[in-house]
Image (spheres, helix red, strand yellow):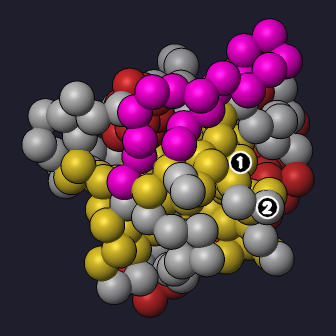
Amino acid sequence: MFLRFFTVLLSLLALSACVLQSEKPLFSEADGVAALQPLGTTFVPFNLVDGQWQAEKDRASFASVGKHYEVKGDDGKTTSVLFVPLGQNSWLMQASEDGKNAAYLIARRDGKALLLQALFCEDLKKDAASTKRLRFDRDDCFVPADFKLAEFKALASNAPPAKMKLEAAE
């Protein structure tokens, strides 16, 4: 019932399949901002397929709780999503679920949409600067507990183009 798109996204993040992660969330509630406030809390998810944005049928709903958001999955589990400012209209998106690693991606506002850029381990392995501070374990990659926001900004500058987006529902 909940949207396939977001379930896939949360699976990537919560299960941390080949995306940048940490053993515990690096950022706290105090670091977060209400990045979605100007856009609303309900979104139409899109995937980039053969160079064209294709909308999913379902909707993504984010419940604002303090300075973070909560998203409930089909399984009833809640994922906490925290947006940490990187610059004007760009954020580090930290997704965490109790008992699992936190995962990270880059979110950039483009009009009424939020473009999502995943930090895939495969791409990070190719960047010599990244390999110095990240720990690679087979297909997974981890930031150390002392990884700073400035280091995430550097990774964001080299992130691949967005292949997912959330567009504000009218």
Q: Which image quadrant for residue 108?
A: bottom right
Residue at 67% x, 76% y is: 85
Q: Is residue 48 visible in the rendered structure shown here?
A: yes
Q: Identify residue for label 2.
A: 111
In the rendered image of this protein, does residue 38 appear above or below residue 25?
below
- Farthest bottom residue? 30
Quarter that holds the C terminus: bottom right
Q: Is residue 150 above or below residue 113?
A: below
Left or right side of 57 for 24:
left
Residue at x-position 41% and y-position 41%: 59
Kindly identify which residue carries mark 1. Answer: 115
Q: Is residue 105 visible?
A: no
Amino acid type assigned to the residue bearing label 1 in the image: Leu
Q: Is residue 71 left or right of residue 44?
A: left
- Considering the whole magenta stretch, tell me its main secondary structure: strand
**Which residue shows up at 30% across the image and 78% down it?**
65
How many other residues sit within 10 Å of disc 1, few (<14), some (14-19) or many (≥20)?
A: many
Q: Is residue 160 left or right of residue 68?
A: right
